[in-house]
Image (spheres, coloured by chain):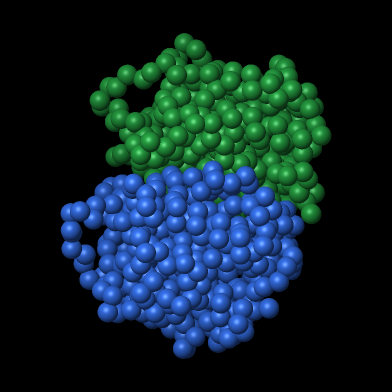
Chain colours: A blue, B green
Amino acid sequence: MKKIGTQTVLLSNKPKIISNFSVVGPKEGKGPLSEYFGKILEDDKLGQKTYEKAEQKLMELAVFSCIEKSGLTPKDIDMFLSGDLLNQIISSSFTARQFDTTFIGLFGACSTMTESLALGSCLVDGEYFENVLCSTCSHFATAERQFRYPLELGTQKPPTSQWTVTGAGATLLSLHGEGPYIEMVTFGKVCDYGVSDVNNMGAAMAPAAMHTLKTHFEDTGRKPDFYDLILTGDLGKFGSETLIDMMEKEGYAFSENYGDCGNMIFDIKQKTFMGGSGCGCSASVLNSYVITKLRRGDIDKVLFLSTGALLSTLSCQQGESIPGIAHAIVIRGK
Amino acid sequence: MKKIGTQTVLLSNKPKIISNFSVVGPKEGKGPLSEYFGKILEDDKLGQKTYEKAEQKLMELAVFSCIEKSGLTPKDIDMFLSGDLLNQIISSSFTARQFDTTFIGLFGACSTMTESLALGSCLVDGEYFENVLCSTCSHFATAERQFRYPLELGTQKPPTSQWTVTGAGATLLSLHGEGPYIEMVTFGKVCDYGVSDVNNMGAAMAPAAMHTLKTHFEDTGRKPDFYDLILTGDLGKFGSETLIDMMEKEGYAFSENYGDCGNMIFDIKQKTFMGGSGCGCSASVLNSYVITKLRRGDIDKVLFLSTGALLSTLSCQQGESIPGIAHAIVIRGK
């Protein structure tokens, strides 16, 4: 068995990240990670009639740029693994329609980037497919309209809220080639601590992040300081502080090697409340800053976990609390 | 590589179906497959306040009955792979919350049963996990409300429409044990022939079924008559006739070994127009009739493909056509 402990699998064939690409909106492009993004949009509507069509174009741009950068052609891709926040993941399905490859649609809310990479890594590692493309995206305007209110209403956001990132990321995994590789995967469980405040996603997702991290350390025998960087997806300021507290109570002290993509993507002056969120948050940070740092050799051992809040507007209206999930991947430098 | 041809993978470790369970609503329970279902509900609301909560209970019932029937306990399950039709797949996520196992959320519309089994088979075959539970469900009332109109409106259905099955199915795959096994998987691609009639899902999905079948035969060198049974998910009367025509044009004549779950689950007297649809359609037929027949030795070689229409209400409102997808699995008797 390749399973070690309860939730972790060790990948002996080292699936390589042979290409990656990120595309972000104008606001994200003015943030602290500006220099790392593959492409910064001037128009967050990408010339489309609706924001939903724009979101799909955003993913398409990330996916096809990622393939082009690898030197491969779309025909070389064996499988496309993708999901997004929109009802029935239309951004992903309509992107999959644009090219001739097998498609597995995922839903893990904002955990989708590592969900796709976790599964994709197993499919490459197990020699089922040679080249697997993993992707996700989100758009501020479509998420606001679907989960909260249309932008035209000008509704005020409460202080614990986060700002959905307009961004997409794509990672191309391959059995061959050169690049940082996925060493292991810790699949996440659904955790629900009873948080029902839809304007405090960080609090809803922190327990899932804690559970996956704790299990990862137990499964592997590693300690937090083994890693050069431990990065959560989009807990934001409140959620990441909650996570640090929870981990301390579990006996794992985080030092300066911990960060959260939601905290990193925006500057405090950009008025995004608790920071960035959305599938595109961890997708764009991973496929820009993180992989660039790994390629450059600035860092070598990264524990990366995207976190998702598994709610729908209807589940909230019917009085349900918000379950969370987090899947972790370990990426190693060359 | 375990890939043969372009989209098919061969599973050398033969992931076994060690348990299966189906639960259906009262209407489905009065249909021709009545004797095969694990449980037939008397109340399609399962005592819940809303139909959405009922749908989630339906899946829970299928999942936990499947585990119980296997002699294992929920703690023995390494992973739960599931998806459904509701926005943000809440039936699956909230079922995953009920037990302590890793969860991968999927969205493949009505293709979800074979999507989950295709992935689950690879994860078991590759020795990543020992016991993987695959499931999906649908409910007539929640699907009508979400995709069409609330039942209270009493809207008339056009003659090409299908009837969403109230049902859930769960299949437990294992590296060990006894039972029919998954021999190979043909992953599907997204196909769009420009059908935009939301009341004719069969027509939208038939091209995807044709594409996957044709590829399966090309990849494996097998012919349709190799199989005792070739079964599509929920093309219904119109869609399955379209498929037969399309396959004939491709040079593959279907004989009496072809069937469609949507045609089988209801009797013509039950007034379901073109027949059954929804994730629960292929899930409940597979996990009752098909696996029972395989276990009894009545049939030995089954090519099973669930078909999905990858639309959302919003994509249709924005003028998009309806892409389809179909993933196929080959199940062999003991």
Residue at 58% across, 20% down: B242
Q: Nearer the viewer, residue A248 or A261?
A: A261
Q: Above or below — where is B229 with respect to B100? A: above
Q: Quadrant of residue B244?
A: top right
Question: Is B248 displayed left or right of A157 in the figure?
Answer: right
Q: Return the residue found at the far top.
A: B269
Residue drawn where x is 61% and y is 60% of the image: A68
The picture places residue A320, in percent across and down from the top left corner, at 31, 53
Q: Is residue A262 left or right of residue A176?
A: left
Whole-percent x, y for residue A195 in the image = 31, 63
Residue B54 point in image, percent of width and height: 38, 39
Residue at 47% across / 11% down in the picture?
Answer: B269
Relative to A230, is A193 above or below? above
Q: Is residue B283 something one can see in this rendering?
A: no
The residue depicted at 51 percent of the width and 48 percent of the height is A95
Figure quadrant of the N terminus of chain A: bottom right
Q: How many marks?
A: 0
Q: Quadrant of residue B285?
A: top right
Q: Does residue B278 appear to the left or right of B36 in the view shown?
A: left
Q: Is residue A38 above or below residue A217?
A: above
On the image, which quarter does residue B235 sit in?
top right
Q: Residue A181: image x %, image y %?
A: 66, 71
Position of the C terminus of chain A by quadrant: bottom right
Whether residue B253 is visible to the viewer of this picture, yes or no, is yes
Q: Give B20 or B269, whichever is nearer the viewer.
A: B269
Q: Nearer the viewer, residue A148 or B42?
A: A148
